[in-house]
Image (cartoon, rainbow, N blue to C red):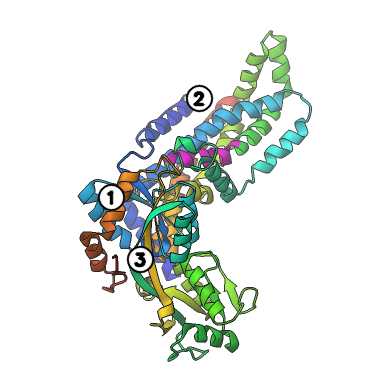
Amino acid sequence: MRLLKAVLLSVLMLLSLVPLSSADSTRIRCASTTSTQNSGLFDFILPLFEKKTGIKVDVVAVGTGAAIEIGKRGDADVVFVHAKEQELKAVEEGFFINRHDVMYNDFVLIGPSNDPAKVKGMKSAADALKKIAESGSLFVSRGDKSGTHTRELSLWKKAGREPVGQKWYLEVGQGMEKTQRIADEKRAYTLTDRGTWLATKDKDKLDMALVLEGDPTLFNQYGVMAVNPERFKTVKRKEAMEFVNWLLSQEGQAAIASFRDKNGNRLFVPNAK
Amino acid sequence: MNLLIDGFKSAFFLILHLYPELWNIILLSLMVSGTALVAATILGLPLGAVIGLKRFRGKSIFISAMNTFMGLPPVVVGLFVYLLLSRSGPLGFMGLLYTPSAMIIAQTVLAFPIVAALCHSAVVHVDPIIRQAAATLGATPCQVTIKVIREARYGILSAIITAFGRVMAEVGAILIVGGNIAGYTRVMTTTIALETDKGNFELALALGVILLVISLVINAILHIVQRKGMMEAGR
């Protein structure tokens, strides 16, 4: 038993090495999307913000739907997502304040490199989806209420097609990069954001190609908004606003513009007004 | 196959260099799971012992319930604790969501039924003669219970080892209530999940190897304690 006691004691001592304190006032929590986190944008801009203001931003990266929900429940101070309509609706409902456009990238349609549905050369994303549906090729959908998923559904609506429940339509409920990999394995088409596509296509050795880009309906606006402090007294209003203002400032916008991924691609274009 | 070999190679590299960031992740994993285990034992051991020694109505239903809860899906526990700790939930005023404390709470909920059920079974299997003898010699019910627990200690240690394996390997619950925040609530398993998501299979695999090695070391230590005790008991 003495040995057991010694083991337990050493475990306890090890435990006491890590402080258990909850978040202090110089930390804020930002609910955001997997695309901003996995592209490396946050790793690049957040240290710049922290250096300037001393405020540490804890990022919880989930789908856009979940990120907005986390904000609505008061479990974050700031929400940074890309589903403008949903964002404006949540602001109208009184959950958030100070919503601003921050930057954009665009969605692109990708598919097997031999393009079995012959989408390459088309101009309209909705027409391309219609063609994929008729060709019998598979289409992989995020199926997770994320910003990308929301956009994809609105494109299907525009195309006049109801894909949910069809045999060629696979809803995977995963993040963007995983969805791309599943599409690659399945020789399927999918809608992705340019950031994730550029950042991961070589790393993941995807045998896929960009088949359609540049349609204005593929524009992907990112916005930031603060959780309404009148709804949740615990929200760190001052620090949250400091973060929002920094993102919109010349300095924050320049930081976003200068961010490059590992392969030197510029992924996000700042467009705060 | 190459990926597997590379994974082991970079695991070795990571262990050799032991980046401070990785060190913190390992420490946090041990801290969260270790604290949860201590809490689950403090709660589960007396409960298991009492159920094993006392007779009461509905006892078999209670035991069945306990055994069922041993198989609680971590994501369900995570969601439950999330809703409980959320600012909009009943315990929201404590501000615990997305902190290591929230992760400890979730893992305690996961480990508690395992400790309780397996301690119950260890206590039940102690030779009833010991109880009777102690009682005959004038021990109070409390002293009898302590005596039985002492006799069952190696079964109880097994219960704790099993619960430890469960919480160290768990990812569903701590991902939901911890949020996988870099440098704050990121532990071994959530890092593995994230790196897999990002396509860094090599790094994810390396971390998996490290996690296994840590579990192996801890289990080996506990096994030595257990065997030594059994030899003493047999003497």
Q: Residue A234 is drawn in which quadrant?
A: top left
Name the N-terminal-most of marks 3 and 2: 2
Q: Secondary structure at mark 3?
A: loop
Closer to the camera, A60 or B156?
Answer: A60
Determine crowd level at label 1: few under 14, some 14-19, many 20+ residues with C-alpha closer than 10 A. some
Question: Could you tell me which quadrant the C terminus of chain B lies in?
Answer: top right
Q: CA distance from mark 1 to mark 3?
A: 24 Å
Relative horizontal placement of residue A221, taking residue A54 as reference (left or right): right
| CB under 8 Å between discs 3 and 2 | no
| CB under 8 Å between discs 1 and 3 | no
Q: CA distance from mark 3 to mark 2?
A: 52 Å
For badge 1, the amino acid type reads: Glu
Q: Secondary structure at mark 1?
A: helix
Q: CA distance from mark 1 to mark 2?
A: 56 Å
Above or below, B147 against B172 in this view is above
Picture coordinates of residue B191, whole percent (x, y): 42, 54
Q: Secondary structure at mark 2?
A: loop
Relative horizontal placement of residue B125, taking residue B108 as reference (left or right): right
Q: Is residue A108 at least partly visible in the picture? A: no
What's the residue at 51%, 69% (across, down)? A150
Give the residue pinned by disc 2.
A1
Disc number placed over residue A242 in the picture, else none: 1
Q: Chain of mark 1?
A: A
Q: Residue A194 is drawn in which quadrant?
A: bottom left
